[in-house]
Image (spheres, helix red, strand yellow):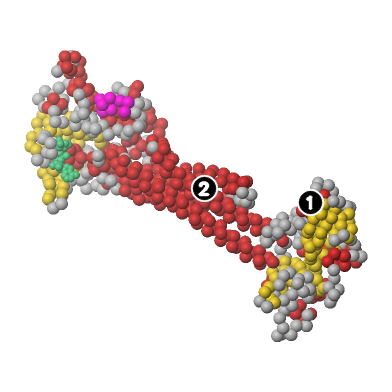
Amino acid sequence: MGDRLIEIEHLGKEYRLGDVPLLALNDVSVQVARGEFVAVMGPSGSGKSTFMNLLGCLDSPTAGRYRLDGRDVSHLDGDALAQVRGRLVGFVFQGFNLLPRTSAVENVELPLVYAGVPAAERRRRALAQLAEVGLAERALHHPSQLSGGQQQRVAIARALVNRPLLILADEPTGALDSRTSIEIMALFQTFNARGITVVLVTHEPDIAAYARRTLRFRDGRLIDDRPVAAPRVAAEVLAAWRPAEEAA
Amino acid sequence: MTLAASLRIALAALRLNLMRSVLTMLGIIIGVGSVITMIAVGSGAEARIADQINSLGSNLIVVVSGAITSGGVRLGFGTQMTLSEEDATALQRELPEILVAAPGVRGSAQIIYGNLNWSTIVFGTTPDFLAARDWGVAQGRPFGQADIDRAAKVALLGQTVATTLFGGADPVGQTIRIKKVPFTVIGVLDRKGQSMQGQDQDDTIVMPLSTARNRVLGASEVNRHAVAAILVKMREGADMGAAEAQIHGLLRQRHHLQPAQDDDFWVRNLSEVAQAQEASSRVLTLLLAAVASVSLVVGGIGIMNIMLVSVTERTREIGLRLAVGARSRDILGQFLIEALTLSLLGGLAGIAVGAAASFTIGHWAHWQTQLRPEAVLLAVGFAAAVGVFFGFYPARKASRLQPIEALRYE
Ligand SMILES: Nc1ncnc2c1ncn2[C@@H]1O[C@H](COP(=O)(O)OP(=O)(O)OP(=O)(O)O)[C@@H](O)[C@H]1O
Ligand SMILES: [Mg+2]
């Protein structure tokens, strides 16, 4: 399988609104190795989310080729894509997307339901995953009883519970304050250190600074791809956090 | 995904909107409840008719004196007594398929016991009559040929007459006056209940034919052996149509009727009449059930409506489920099972409502009702079919959502 998790060649996505074709993604070629931590940046409407949807097999490209974990997934049908998502990919969304009026642990169990894991093991794994994101005591809380940061932790636990190779996060800190954002980045760094590949979209350079590589999009094209010179370590930033900065 | 997991998801979703789920189920509850109640009422009517057929006795043919019509008007039972005891004997002798042929006369009479008096129907007949009607004696003894030969003044009381005149006391051995003539009560007949015409069959007195003719009703001036009717009971398995024709032919011959002459009697297959009534009550049951099932269909439309609302409301949830690995058939299954759960739970509650309603109607309106297991199965099966049918469209709509569009849905 090699060390390439993501291999993308001349990938394109065209939307048709009436007769006008709109190239949301235009001739993108990029490779991501296993264990990388990639930030995706670019102005609004530049195609970041479109790119992420293709990476996550939520959508199929209209041009080019996409190999995930050595398998060409460009032209799979809906059910095959669902299986790829279920096995290989975990999603974290800006709006958390937790099931309302459903306990944290049940939210985390959700991917395991569709993977056919028996109920008892589901519960055990979901609780362990919640403990890993520091929410062991909140397992029975409903989303409405959790803070934004806690909800995003539940969402991260849900993304990780199926032991995916790839975590895709589209503006995961967009709805959070700066300290909570760094806490979330700390979680991503922790799991990335264990070998899980992370790709996340962000508008904030401060957040992108926690990644090890940055991809920049404009008008559907990949215009820049460079390593981050000295990635920040979220745990250190948190340790040095002073209340004064919170006020600033 | 396993069925148990789908079921758990469905129940959880229904519990989240408990009030809405219950209201949606109400349609099915009322539908199933009314189907079950209507079938119970209809079956009760059928059963009552079946009871009446049994109380009548089976394989019965009645031959009645008099022309069928006289100037276009049907004449009453035995207006002119053209039949005779000898006709009955001849039928019994000539037609081996006949089990018994009981001649009889009938009239109303005033009965007095102590200071009580009561007007009832008096039957004068032979012991064969009780055999033909499968009518047993509850207390005392039936009369025999000896009583007929002597024109003994003995009487068998129907249950209604017995309780009216004697209350709880034992009437056997007591003396009553029928048209002022003293009679000894020798027995009380079994209870027969209502006839198909709604008459109380127990409001009657049965006595020997000779006694009735000589002492109570008065004999015909023309023929001392004339009778109003002959009740014929055929052997089990006899061809009733053929028997009717044979009786008809034999009697015409005995009455010396020329081919051009009308019958001076008429023959009627009683079981056939009863069966026709049974058939019409079955049609009634079907009609009632059909009307009630309309409400079940309306309940199904309610399910479809709420499921469509639910799919729209939960579009983002569907998107999320798709994102974490649900296939479209998982989503289809989830919503179908949800619809099916609504209709089946509604169906179960409907059984309870239907059973309670049937019982209440039976108890308070004094209608016989009958809760039949096959009706219950039918109603619940129909409810499930309604759930699948009306749940399918919303479920398919949900399963056809594209993951990104569903996730983006506001
Ligand atoms: N379903 C769609 N139909 C038509 N056009 C679409 C659709 N989805 C996205 N687009 C268009 O594709 C382009 C890229 O959209 P995309 O959502 O990828 O941008 P983005 O970089 O994520 O922006 P933002 O930072 O605001 O989230 C936009 O011009 C958008 O209007
Ligand atoms: Mg976006």
At 52% across and 58% down in the image, what residue appears?
Answer: B287
Q: Is residue A149 magenta?
A: yes
**In-front residue for pair A39/A6:** A39
Does the beta carbon at disc 2 come under 8 Å from ligand 1? no
Judge from the rendering whether residue A165 lies leftward or rightward of residue B111; answer left or right.
Answer: left
**SS of the residue at dot 1?**
helix
Q: Position of residue B348 (x, y in %)?
A: 50, 44
Q: Is residue B382 left or right of residue B205?
A: left
The magenta span reads A144-152
The answer to whether dots 1 and 2 both sit on one chain is yes
- The earlier-in-sequence mark between 1 and 2 is 2
Chain at numbered mark 1: B
* Quarter-of-image position of residue A70: top left
User: Which residue type carries mark 1?
Assistant: Thr
Disc 2 is attached to a residue of which chain?
B
Q: In the rendered view, would you say B29 is above or below A99?
A: below
Q: Residue B148 or A49: which is nearer the viewer?
A: B148
In the image, which is nearer the foreground, mark 1 or mark 2?
1
Q: Can residue A243 be seen in the rendering of this structure? A: yes
Which residue is under mark 1? B164
Q: How many marks?
A: 2
Q: Amino acid at mark 2?
A: Gly
In the depicted structure, whether residue A147 falls above or below residue B378:
above
Q: Quadrant of the N terminus of chain A?
A: top left
List the single residue furthest toward the right.
B150
In the rendered image, which residue does mark 2 sit on?
B33
Query: Residue at horizontal 10%, vertical 37%?
Result: A217
